[in-house]
């Protein structure tokens, strides 16, 4: 018979499990995982103790007994979270005489949407960094878009999960990747990239593995090719060739009257840096594509 696990109990087990993993004490790890199997763990308990993140790391352990116990626990907890989510989203059936529930899809401005402003009902992941990262991806996916919040959240989850799979430790690499991807979504003025993700044309996994040049619009790619060709003929000239474009939007005056040129500021196998100048207010900035 399973018993409800207190936050203190889970925190204590998590500390012991982490210590045993560091010392590679297989016997203690197995015993602790079995103890967890006898406990009922709530979503709030997982968030407070971070036990889910620790157990998740053991799913790929070389010891088959440990990996199976860990995988079974994660599956059990995922199902429990799913049940809680479904019970919250379906509190009961409405009769014809019952008033309709209030519509949750209310927003003041589609250009400034967040998980909270869209009243999205969701179960926190249980890790502050991952929860904030999910919110960041959501806000940038929903930028100037009126898609249903449930769809935006689903796609944001897909992107965040793909990044997490690359770095389950949720370290610097995870944070840098999330910020980079959010920047690409935010800088994609035409909304084409965001639309491709929301419509399912571009999966989260494909999106996070795209090369820097792939994030550019066809117009930008064409102009980059043009300026590269011009620079080849002017390598011994007075300086870099500048081209006019309306593909960039000035953050100061919000006009699209710009000139730009490129320089190789990094190693030869990385994309060049684009330097942009607004011809309206002379504001200058650079666009750095990196992952």
Image: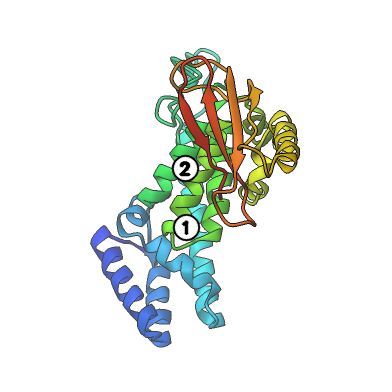
- Percent from the top left, x then y, of residue 271? 62, 48
- Percent from the top left, x then y, of residue 289? 57, 43
* Relative height, residue 42 to residue 111 (above, below): below
Q: Nearer the viewer, residue 25 or 253?
A: 253
Residues packed near mark 2 inside 10 Å, few (<14), some (14 to 19) or many (20 plus):
many
Asked whether, in this view, residue 64 is left or right of residue 99, the answer is right
Q: Nearer the viewer, residue 247 or 165?
A: 247
- Percent from the top left, x then y, of residue 179? 47, 44
Q: Is residue 87 visible?
A: no
* Relative height, residue 23 to residue 175 (above, below): below
Q: Nearer the viewer, residue 39 or 252?
A: 252
Asked whether, in this view, residue 190 is left or right of residue 118, the answer is right
CA gap, disc 2 to disc 1?
16 Å
Of the image marks 2 and 1, the number of the one nearer the N terminus: 2
- Percent from the top left, x then y, of residue 39? 37, 65
Residue at image coords 44%, 44% = 133
Q: Secondary structure at mark 2?
A: helix
Q: Which residue is mark 2?
A: 134
Q: Secondary structure at mark 1?
A: helix
Residue at image coords 53%, 70% = 59
Q: Quadrant of the image for the N terminus? A: bottom left
The numbered dot on residue 173 is 1
Residue at image coords 64%, 57% = 269
Q: Choose mark 2 or mark 1, whichever is in front.
A: 1
Residue at image coords 62%, 26% = 191
């Amino acid at each position: 018979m399973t018993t409800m696990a207190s936050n203190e109990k889970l925190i204590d087990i998590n500390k012991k499990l982490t210590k045993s993993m560091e010392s590679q004490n297989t016997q203690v790890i197995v015993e602790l995982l079995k103890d967890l199997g006898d406990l009922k763990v709530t979503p709030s308990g997982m968030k407070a103790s971070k036990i889910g993140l620790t157990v998740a790391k053991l799913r790929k352990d070389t010891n088959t007994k440990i990996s199976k116990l860990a995988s079974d626990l994660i599956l059990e907890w995922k199902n429990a979270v799913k049940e809680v989510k479904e019970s919250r989203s379906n509190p009961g059936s409405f009769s014809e005489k019952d008033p309709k529930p209030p519509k949750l899809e209310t927003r003041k401005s589609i250009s400034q949407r967040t998980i909270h402003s869209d009243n999205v009902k969701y179960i926190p992941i249980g890790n502050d960094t991952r929860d904030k990262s999910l919110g960041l991806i959501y806000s940038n996916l929903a930028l100037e878009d009126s898609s249903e919040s449930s769809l935006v959240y689903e796609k944001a989850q897909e992107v965040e999960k793909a990044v997490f799979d690359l770095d389950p430790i949720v370290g610097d690499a995870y944070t840098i990747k999330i910020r980079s991807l959010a920047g690409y979504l935010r800088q994609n003025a035409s909304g084409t990239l965001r639309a491709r993700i929301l419509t399912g044309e571009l999966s989260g996994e494909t999106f996070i593995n795209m090369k820097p040049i792939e994030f550019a619009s066809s117009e930008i790619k064409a102009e980059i090719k043009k300026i590269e060709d011009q620079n080849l003929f002017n390598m011994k000239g007075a300086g870099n060739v500048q081209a006019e474009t309306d593909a960039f939007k000035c953050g100061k005056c919000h006009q699209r009257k710009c000139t730009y040129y490129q320089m190789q500021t990094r190693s030869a196998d990385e994309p060049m840096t684009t330097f942009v100048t607004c011809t309206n207010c002379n504001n200058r900035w650079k666009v750095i594509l990196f992952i």
